[in-house]
Amino acid sequence: MVTIAYKALTTTISVTEDVRDKLLKVASELQIKLGRRVDLNEAIEFLLSKNLTKPELFDRACQPETRMKGAYEELIQERRKDELRSKRRYGI
């Protein structure tokens, strides 16, 4: 029998203190519900799976607000100008 251990890839993410506190609350509620220790990764997976059961709500939440549509278009145009300036200046 051969046992192969895979090293889990980890990434550091930054969140505000209030989001961290909310995430810890979700993790503690899961621990009570499941009767075992739950880490923050499991809490995030739970939240993602819970929210993806209604993908139309997730898609709607990721779209820019209609009143911000003009600002979003301006942001895209300005970003394109930045890219052109970088190409002219650095030849990239």
Image: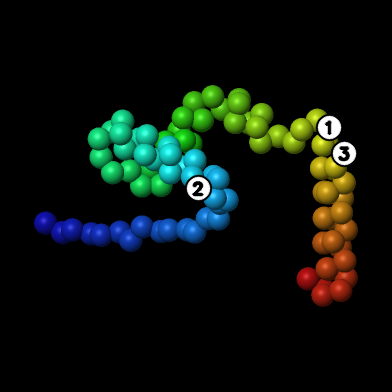
Q: Is residue 52 above or below residue 22?
A: above
Q: Is residue 52 above or below residue 25?
A: above
Quarter of the picture holding the N terminus: bottom left
Residue 54 occupies quadrant: top right
Q: Residue furthest left?
A: 1
Position of 27 with respect to 90 (left or right) is: left
The first of marks 1 and 2 along the sequence is 2
Residue occupied by mark 2: 20
Q: Is residue 14 above or below residue 22?
A: below
Which amino acid is tagged 2? Arg
Which is nearer the eye, 27 or 81?
27
Say if residue 30 shows up in the picture: yes
Say if residue 45 shows up in the picture: no
What is the C-alpha distance between the residues marked 2 and 3? 33 Å
> Of circles 1 and 3, which is in front?
1
Q: Residue furthest bottom?
A: 90
What is the C-alpha distance between the residues marked 1 and 2? 30 Å
Residue occupied by mark 1: 67
Which amino acid is tagged 1? Arg
> Of circles 2 and 3, which is in front?
2
Tell me how the rendering is colored: rainbow
What is the C-alpha distance between the residues marked 1 and 3? 7 Å
Q: Are marks 1 and 2 in contact (CB under 8 Å)?
A: no
Residue occupied by mark 3: 70
Asked which secondary structure carries label 1, the reply is helix
Find residue 12 and report its horizontal and vertical position in percent.
Answer: 49, 59
Asked which secondary structure carries label 2, the reply is helix
